[in-house]
Amino acid sequence: MSVRYRPATLEDVPLLALWNARLYVDEHMPGSKSLEEFTTRMHGWLARGEYQAVLFEAEEGPVAYALYRQEAEGIYIRHFYVDRPFRRRGLGRRCVHLLLTEVLPPCERVLLDVLEANPIGQAFWRAVGFRPYCHRLEILPEERAARAKLSPSETT
């Protein structure tokens, strides 16, 4: 199956927002958002030029997208999503290859985050050449509040 790409436009926002909502579920992200919230956010990012998106298409139509932007450290990929019916066919690898060789500037470092709760995503990105760089940790506000009630000796 051949894959081609094109820059996403504001007309693509409904599809990109739907896929972003599915990505949110697939990555086991905390909390919930409505499709309208995903749509508003995606439209804003693209309309303001905060991010660029590329849509990957096969004979059947759109199959994947990537959302990225230039940062001081390099190109940051915020989203990469292959629609569920097209997974496990090598399309994701082909799309990443196109992204790295034809879409993104060749002399730029490329960064992305993969959630700890997403071992399939971690394995995918390693398989296409990415390697771990740092380990980001977090503490949520409710956990901070609970820990604030403990004495210093109870927090170690």
Image: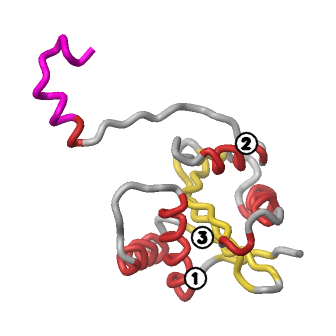
Q: Residue furthest right?
A: 1
Q: Relative to the observer, which residue lies in front, 19 or 98?
A: 19
Which residue type does callout 2 highlight?
A: Arg
What secondary structure is found at the residue carrying circle 1? loop
Q: Is residue 45 above or below residue 148?
A: below
For the residues labelled 1 and 2, the Cα–Cα distance comes to 30 Å
User: Which residue type does callout 3 highlight?
Assistant: Ala
Question: Where the C terminus falls, by quadrant?
Answer: top left
> What scheme was used to colour the molecule?
secondary structure
Q: Is residue 142 left or right of residue 14?
A: left
Image coordinates of residue 100 in percent, x first then y, are 76, 56
Identify the residue position indicated by label 3 in the image: 53
Label 2 Cα neighbours within 10 Å, binned few <14 / some 14-19 / many ≥20: few
Q: Which mark is residue 9?
A: 1
| 73 is higher (above) or lower (below) than 5 | above
Q: Position of residue 154 (x, y in %)?
A: 19, 16
Give above or below for 42 relative to 103.
below
- Quarter assignment of residue 130: top right
Query: Can you give x and y, in whole percent of width and height, for residue 150 in the image?
Result: 13, 22
Circle 1: residue type: Thr
Task: Answer few, some or many: residues within 10 Å of disc 1's Cα (few below 14, many 20 plus, some between 14 and 19).
Answer: some
Query: Going 75% across and 58% down the picture, which residue do you hit?
Result: 96
Instruction: Please tell me which of labels 1 and 2 falls first in the chain.
Output: 1
Distance, label 1 to label 3, CA atoms, is 8 Å
Q: Which residues are magenta?
A: 144-156
- Circle 1/circle 2 CB separation < 8 Å: no
Within the magenta stretch, is there residue 126? no
Mark seen at residue 126: 2
For the residue labelled by badge 2, is the local secondary structure a helix, a strand or a loop? Answer: helix
